[in-house]
Image (cartoon, helix red, strand yellow):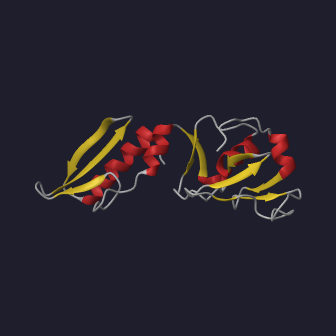
Amino acid sequence: MSTTTSLTRERLLALLSYAPRTGVFRWRVARRGPAVVGSIAGCIGSIGYRVISIDDKIYLAHRLAFLYMTGCWPQQDVDHRNRKRHDNRWSNLRDVSRSVNICNMKGPMQGAPFRGVSWLPSRGKYNARLTLRGSRMLDANFDTLDEAIATREQAREFWHGGY
């Protein structure tokens, strides 16, 4: 996939339309093959992201959405808030640090009731934990699942700004 940013917003606008509410890019111009005017641009790539070929370069659709909407390429990683790689609705995308993006990639540990919360049978308590750039920012035990989840959520909001 292209890491270059030679594509301009003007060129992108001339070739594609983008619907922020649906996240769908459509061709404005006739192209060779099945890409006719009005058809959905690109395809879902092997790792689940929509990719679009423009001027013989492959671009990730979520990065194109930033160029389309803001006129600038994203400065950092583009995160899909709901973790669905093909969901390119503008409300689902955000320009975030690699650390925040990685935090949003991780799901609950196997057997855990909530991401960042686990049951400690030897202590009869729930453990809430949160790390930031490899450093443990929260590691605390609670009597109830609700306390552990609430504390983990407060810490997540404070340290990561939500995700």
Viewer-proximal residue among 4 and 64: 4
Viewer-proximal residue among 57 and 66: 57
Q: Is residue 161 visible?
A: no
| Residue at 67%, 41% in the rendered image | 2
Quick check: 75 left or right of 38? left
Q: Position of residue 19 (x, y in %)?
A: 75, 58
Please give the count of numbered marks on the rendered protein: 0
Viewer-proximal residue among 69 and 158: 69
Quadrant the N terminus occupies: top right
Q: Is residue 116 visible?
A: yes
| Residue at 14%, 59% in the rendered image | 121
| Residue at 72%, 58% in the rendered image | 42
Q: Position of residue 130 (x, y in %)?
A: 33, 43
State the image quarter where residue 74 is shown.
Answer: top right
Q: Position of residue 146 (x, y in %)?
A: 29, 59
| Residue at 30%, 37% in the rendered image | 136
Q: Is 77 located above or below residue 148 in the figure?
A: above
Q: Is 117 located above or below residue 99 in the figure?
A: below
Quick check: 143 left or right of 2? left
Quick check: 52 left or right of 112? right
Quick check: 105 left or right of 52? left
State the image quarter where residue 92 is shown.
Answer: bottom right
